[in-house]
Amino acid sequence: MATRRKSAASSADPDALLRERAHPLTDVIEALRALLRKAEPLLEEHVKWNAPSYRHRGEDRITFQLRDDDRVRLVFHCGSKPSDPRRKEPLVEDPKGLLEWAAPDRGIASFRSLAEVKQGFAALTALVRNWLSVPA
């Protein structure tokens, strides 16, 4: 299992947090971070849930989940606001089926290898852009 230490530096700095954590899939994490920056250069990276997280227009929208050593998850969410219980359909279309929907406003994409990231690069980039185009 990867180290779960948390220091003052890592609590605010995603790079320091990732260096300290030394996740076995660092190449996957870095590829996904680069994809997110390329998909939307205005994303603001910070630390949330002990992992890199991204704000768009002041709202948390995409957060890494790094608790497992055999996969990296990206959680697509709408900040801390509660879900509309009347909503039944996902907020965005996911034609390639990259997301597992935990709720209509919360989807999770999982990656176990750099090859999976590369294979889904175009679809994931489009998904990120679509997700961020929907108001939180």
Image (cartoon, grey):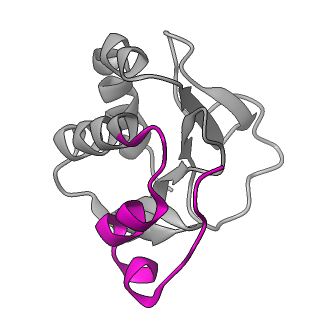
Front residue of 3/50: it is: 3
Q: Is residue 51 magenta?
A: no
Is 131 located above or below residue 116 in the figure?
below
Return the x and y of residue 29 as percentages of the image width and height.
38, 42
Return the x and y of residue 70 as percentages of the image width and height.
61, 32
Front residue of 58/39: it is: 39
Find residue 22 and report its image quarter.
Answer: bottom left
Is 61 located above or below residue 107 in the figure?
below
Residue at (37%, 84%) from the top-left corner?
Answer: 9
Find residue 78 and report its image quarter.
Answer: bottom right
Return the x and y of residue 75 as percentages of the image width and height.
57, 45
Q: Is residue 4 magenta?
A: yes
Residue at (40%, 28%) from the top-left corner?
Answer: 127
Give the residues in magenta. 1-26
Residue at (26%, 36%) from the top-left corner?
Answer: 35
Return the x and y of residue 104 as percentages of the image width and height.
70, 37
Is 47 located above or below residue 3 in the figure?
below
